[in-house]
Amino acid sequence: MDDTIRRKILNLLHQNPEISQRELAEKLGISLGKVNYCLKSVIQKGWVKVNNFRNSQNKTAYSYILTPGGIELKARLTIDYIRIKMQEYEDIKKELEELVEDAKNQQIEIDELIEFESV
């Protein structure tokens, strides 16, 4: 499981501990089987604790609680994600500035060409 999926799962579980695996799959855009695999992984690593409870429809359901280690991991993954996105933003900003400068230079060249042709 990659850090993006791990971060998203931990965030969703933190926001809604009683979320179903089906809801997780829908929100993450991944298969139910992959959600099950990912949940088993975060539980096995001690980042999430699972509790059984009965919901109003009398079906067995689970509550997923982040452990202190899970909360720490969620924070670290979020910080890493923010750093990556900030770098991507800076890269895009620089590229856009270069494109604008190129467009300005091309316009100057076009203006000079038009001026030359009218002579």
Image: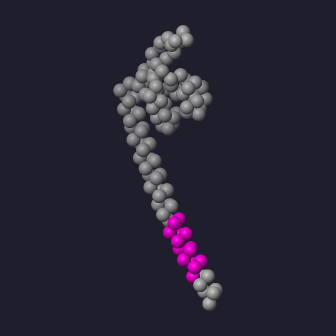
What residue is at 59 percent from the left and 84 percent from the top? 115
Whole-percent x, y for residue 71 in the image: 38, 30
Magenta-colored stretch includes residue 91: no
Does 49 appear above or below 87?
above
Q: From the image, give the main secondary structure of the stretch colored magenta.
A: helix
Q: Residue at x 51, y 15 (%)?
A: 61
Instruction: Please give the range of residues in magenta.
Output: 99-112
Q: Residue furthest front?
A: 118
Q: Position of residue 85 (x, y in %)?
A: 46, 47
Q: Is residue 84 visible?
A: yes
- At horizontal 47% and vertical 30% (from top left) the residue drawn is 12
Query: Quadrant location of the C terminus?
Result: bottom right
Q: Position of residue 18 (x, y in %)?
A: 48, 21
Viewer-closest of 63 and 118: 118
- Would residue 78 be found to the left or right of residue 20 on screen? left
Query: In the orientation shown, which residue stands out farthest toward the bottom?
Result: 119
Q: Quadrant of residue 113?
A: bottom right
| Residue 109: in magenta span | yes
